[in-house]
Amino acid sequence: MDIASTAYIIDDDSIYVYSIKKLIALRSFCNQVISFSNGADALQALKDANVSGLGMPQIVLLDINMPVMDGWDFLHEFEKLQPTLSAEVIIYMVSSSPDDRDVKRAMATGLVKNYMAKPMTLARLAEIFGDSVAA
């Protein structure tokens, strides 16, 4: 994959978001990283980006447990929106939950490319963004 223009981080943990942004910037994995603390704000931004053609994410790093709209609800709403999107959006579920049921549920949606456990590493981000980094 070429360098993504825009990535969304949807997670309510501000320390995690800060660290992921720093890791992404360290390797210049994408040009713009936009973060949201809940799925509802991210979904609205996605709708706005789809209409305007600006800031459409190529990659979404989605947490499960968040206030207002959690990751599962985001995926449910994204599924309805997906046919109208002007570009492909690749979603990675990134969670601290080690529960195999969460992994199976995420992968069963057909919307999630991969389920990754926190904490994220530079090597895992390289895998997501299509780069190669030694582990």
Image (spheres, rainbow, N blue to C red):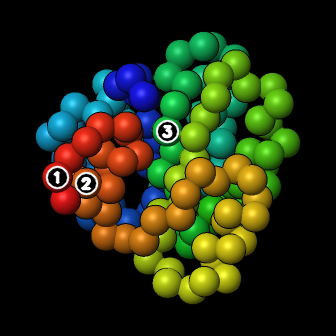
How far separated are the C-alphas under marks 3 and 2? 16 Å
Q: Position of residue 9 (x, y in %)?
A: 44, 48
> Which image quarter: residue 120?
bottom left
Give the structural element (helix, strand or loop) at label 2. helix
Question: Which residue is pictured at 75% across the width and 64% down the height?
Answer: 108
| Residue density around tag 3, few if under 14, some if 14–19, many if 20 or more, within 10 Å | many
**Residues packed near mark 1 inside 10 Å, few (<14), some (14 to 19) or many (20 plus):** few
Say what secondary structure mark 3 lies in: strand
Which residue in the structure is indicated by mark 1? 134
**Image mark for residue 123:** 2
Kindly identify the amino acid type of the residue bearing the numbered disc 2: Ala
Q: How many marks?
A: 3
Picture quadrant of residue 89: top right
Question: Given contact means CB atoms under 8 Å apart, are the residues at marks 3 and 2 in contact?
Answer: no
Give, as a three-letter code, the residue at label 3.
Ile
Label 2 neighbour load within 10 Å: few <14, some 14-19, many 20+: some
| Label 1 residue SS | loop
Residue drawn at (52%, 31%) of the image? 57
Q: Give the vertical position of 124 relative to 13 (above or below).
A: above
Which residue carries the number 3 mark? 59
